[in-house]
């Protein structure tokens, strides 16, 4: 990385962002300085055009291979209604993991048939909700869950369209905490038991088995990890079809990585070609469940410098965003790029700086040694690639208010979630009568 202006390289590699001579760092042409002065900081800012373009790129890579998979966007990555709505308009459905996500997907106008319900611990009321709405696919993760599904479906006079989630025992994923396809992970049905369970599912009343699903982890870059998993599942399908089983769907899961540094992008064309090769001419309806890949690079966390503190042997830049806003660095040791926003920033000398948040935890640190221009209180920085697993994982820890969220579309910017207010922080607390402070 060119040490003179390391942040320029990070920005140049991101389709949503550009430095402008006047205006500083812009997202889809809109200066972040302007967004900060309109809505304050910290604020999540998303570029609608980038999300649309990425969805189109994904579909385009598959189309090149003659494939038209159904995209079921993993709502957990960013569940904002505005994001869901624009993905719906681009043709995506949803992969949901709770009643809350299902309600959001439906509220965004996603058709029930275009929703997949995944998750290792679906509650009875959630299954009833899914069946009541006619959700397109429920991914079952165990024999025990199949029995519950069957009983509920029968009691409601419905058929549950079920895909069995297979755990293919493949190691993949950018971090131990986001790997899901190893035998020791809690997810899915052990590969060796999957065939027997499919046969069993076919005998259960109220269950309509439609195929298999798999999801081996998140932040994966190598198509070969996916290939190992898919090949195993496809062999399983061949074996069962050989016995006469009807299997129409293969849900490939999500997990496509995004570079948080200046590294290479996920090779989507090679991935699509691999899927083509592995699926062959099997006549399977394919599903993909990308989350991070669609929305991650489309968002930044725009945050202000509260204070620059002289620590032992280093400068510490203290931001107004903390681990309650973006927990990925604290939780996974994730390193998000941090770049200056102001227009003069690029001409200042580079200093290596520690960048932290204000939360009372040592893990509330965004970077141990980040090249930045000399920073001062009131300056702005953008934490990059925060569109996925950012706002959704935020909390009120340390009594901190949930950040504002802004969507840039065309030349316009819209506040899509107002910053939480202090009164809202305590709104749901109930103090027993005897403990109430005298009025
Ligand atoms: N499908 C299923 C069944 C999943 O469990 C997930 C993510 C996805 C799809 C979407 O995966 P993606 O394409 O976004 O990698 N909070 C972590 C990521 C957890 C992912 C959990 N499952 C992070 O910030 O890295």
Image (cartoon, rainbow, N blue to C red):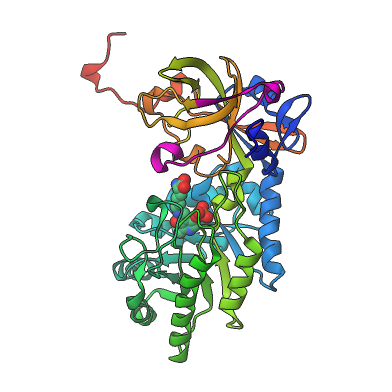
Please check the rendered image and state whether residue 280 is part of the magenta-colored stretch, yes or no.
no
Image quarter in which the N terminus is found: top right
Q: What stretch is highlighted in magenta?
A: 327-353
Residue 116 percent across, percent down from the top left: 50, 61
Residue 248 percent across, percent down from the top left: 53, 78
Residue 329 percent across, percent down from the top left: 44, 38
Relative depth, front residue between 157 and 374: 374
The residue at the point 59 percent across, 15 percent down is 378
Q: Is residue 426 visible?
A: no
Relative height, residue 185 to residue 18 (above, below):
below
Residue 135 percent across, percent down from the top left: 50, 62
Q: How many marks?
A: 0
125 relative position to 343: left or right: left
Please check the rendered image and state whether residue 329 is part of the magenta-colored stretch, yes or no.
yes
The residue at the point 41 percent across, 67 percent down is 170
Relative height, residue 224 to residue 300 (above, below):
below
358 relative position to 204: left or right: right
Relative depth, front residue between 358 and 291: 358
């Amino acid at each position: 990385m060119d040490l003179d202006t390391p942040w320029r390289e990070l920005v140049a590699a991101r389709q949503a962002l550009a430095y402008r001579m006047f205006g500083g760092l812009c997202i889809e042409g809109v200066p972040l300085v302007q967004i900060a002065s309109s809505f304050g900081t910290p604020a999540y800012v998303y570029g609608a055009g980038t999300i649309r373009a990425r969805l189109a790129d994904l579909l385009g890579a598959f189309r090149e291979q003659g494939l038209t998979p159904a995209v079921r966007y993993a709502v957990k990555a960013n569940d904002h209604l505005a994001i869901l709505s624009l993905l719906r308009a681009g043709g995506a459905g949803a992969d949901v993991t709770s009643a809350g996500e299902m309600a959001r997907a439906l509220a965004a106008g996603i058709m029930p048939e275009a929703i997949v319900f995944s998750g290792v611990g679906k509650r009875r009321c959630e299954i009833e909700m899914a069946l009541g709405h006619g959700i397109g696919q429920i991914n079952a993760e165990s024999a025990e869950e199949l029995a519950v599904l069957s009983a509920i479906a029968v009691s409601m006079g419905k058929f549950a369209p079920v895909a069995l989630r297979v755990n293919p025992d493949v190691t993949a994923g950018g971090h131990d905490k986001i790997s899901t396809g190893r035998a020791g992970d809690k997810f899915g049905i052990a590969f060796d038991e999957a065939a027997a369970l499919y046969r069993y599912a076919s005998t259960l009343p109220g269950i309509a088995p439609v195929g298999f699903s798999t999801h081996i982890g998140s932040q994966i870059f190598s198509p070969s990890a996916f290939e190992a998993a898919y090949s195993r599942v496809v062999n399983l399908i061949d074996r069962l079809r050989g016995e006469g089983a009807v299997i129409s769907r293969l849900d490939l899961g999500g997990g496509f990585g995004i570079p948080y540094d200046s590294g290479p992008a996920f090779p989507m064309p090679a991935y699509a070609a691999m899927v083509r090769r592995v699926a062959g001419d099997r006549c399977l309806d394919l599903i993909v469940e990308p989350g991070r890949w669609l929305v991650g690079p489309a968002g930044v966390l725009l945050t202000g410098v509260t204070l620059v503190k002289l620590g032992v042997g280093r400068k510490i830049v203290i931001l107004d965003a903390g681990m309650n806003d973006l927990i990925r660095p604290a939780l996974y040791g994730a390193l998000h790029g941090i770049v200056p926003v102001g227009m003069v920033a690029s001409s200042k000398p580079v200093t290596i700086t520690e960048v932290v948040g204000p939360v009372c935890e040592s893990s509330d640190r965004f970077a141990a040694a980040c090249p930045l221009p000399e920073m001062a209180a009131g300056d702005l920085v953008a934490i990059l690639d925060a569109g996925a697993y950012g706002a959704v994982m935020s909390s009120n820890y340390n009594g901190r208010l949930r950040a504002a969220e802004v969507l840039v579309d065309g030349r316009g910017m819209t506040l899509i979630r107002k910053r939480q207010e202090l009164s809202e922080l305590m709104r749901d607390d109930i103090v027993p009568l005897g403990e109430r402070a005298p009025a």
